[in-house]
Image (cartoon, helix red, strand yellow):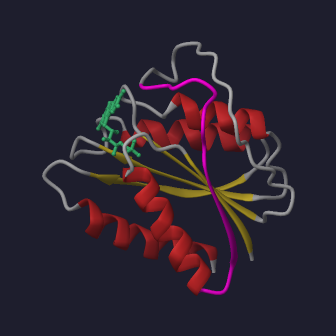
């Protein structure tokens, strides 16, 4: 299957999750493309609930992809405005399957994680995607690497 992974990551945690997905899905025989988004001016924070002007140096095309995995950190108890803006700018997801993923600081998913995935799922659905359950991994009081390994496995099984 042709898979695009598109990730926003400021300090590397969500990129680590994206790399884990890339490695596993490639091993599974898929053709996988990974893009870490770069903005034209540095964006260090913000909220998806506030209007922000965000533009990109490297928005990928996804015409060929059958599955798109969108990932980003939890910011301000919600989705990263960077990944949500990228989703909107990349545009139509008609005929594609989307799985959202992310990482967060706090150990409990209701402290932003659930809301982030719900926001990304709504955005993907509005753009015409078939949306499969997303995934969030936590840092504090948890083992981020172990969560990434477990969630990578769960996502890879959904794609088969
Ligand atoms: C501006 C900003 C806001 C954040 N807000 C939250 C939050 O509301 N809830 C949470 O659990 N973590 C929050 N975090 C922590 C990040 O979600 C967490 O460190 C994540 O793993 C960072 O991913 P990255 O390394 O891919 O950038 C925030 C971090 C930043 C920089």
Quarter of the view holding residue 143:
bottom left
Q: Answer whether residue 123 is visible to the viewer in this image.
A: yes
Q: Answer whether residue 157 is visible to the viewer in this image.
A: no
What percent of the width, then of the height, locates residue 73?
A: 42, 41
The image quadrant where one finds ligand 1 is top left
What percent of the width, then of the height, locates residue 53?
A: 64, 16
Query: Eyeballing the image, is 18 above or below 82?
Result: below
In the image, residue 142 lies in the stretch drawn in magenta: no
Query: Eyeballing the image, is 102 above or below 85?
Result: below
Q: Residue at x 79, y 49 (%)?
A: 93
Q: Residue at x 51, y 78 (%)?
A: 24
Give the magenta part as a residue range: 28-44
Return the residue nearer the eye: 149 or 34.
34
The majority secondary structure of the magenta stretch comes to loop
In the image, residue 30 lies in the stretch drawn in magenta: yes
Considering the image in quadrants, where does the C terminus appear? bottom right
Quarter of the view holding residue 96:
bottom right
Q: Residue at x 42, y 26 (%)?
A: 44
What percent of the width, then of the height, locates residue 129?
A: 75, 51
Q: Is residue 65 left or right of residue 10?
A: right
């Amino acid at each position: 299957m042709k898979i695009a992974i598109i990730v926003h990551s400021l300090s590397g945690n969500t990129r680590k999750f994206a790399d884990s997905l890339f490695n596993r899905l490639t091993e599974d025989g898929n053709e996988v493309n990974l893009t870490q988004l770069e903005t034209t001016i540095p964006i260090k924070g913000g909220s998806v609930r506030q209007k922000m002007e965000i533009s990109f140096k490297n928005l990928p095309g996804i015409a060929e992809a059958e599955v798109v995995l969108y990932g980003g950190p939890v910011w301000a108890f919600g989705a990263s405005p960077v990944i949500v803006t990228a989703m909107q700018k990349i545009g139509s997801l008609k005929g594609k399957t989307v799985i959202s993923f992310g990482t967060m600081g706090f150990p409990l998913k209701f402290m932003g994680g659930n809301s982030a995935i719900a926001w990304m799922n709504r955005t993907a659905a509005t753009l015409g995607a078939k949306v499969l359950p997303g995934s969030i991994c936590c840092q504090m009081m948890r083992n981020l690497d172990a969560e990434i390994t477990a969630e990578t496995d769960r996502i890879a099984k959904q794609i088969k």
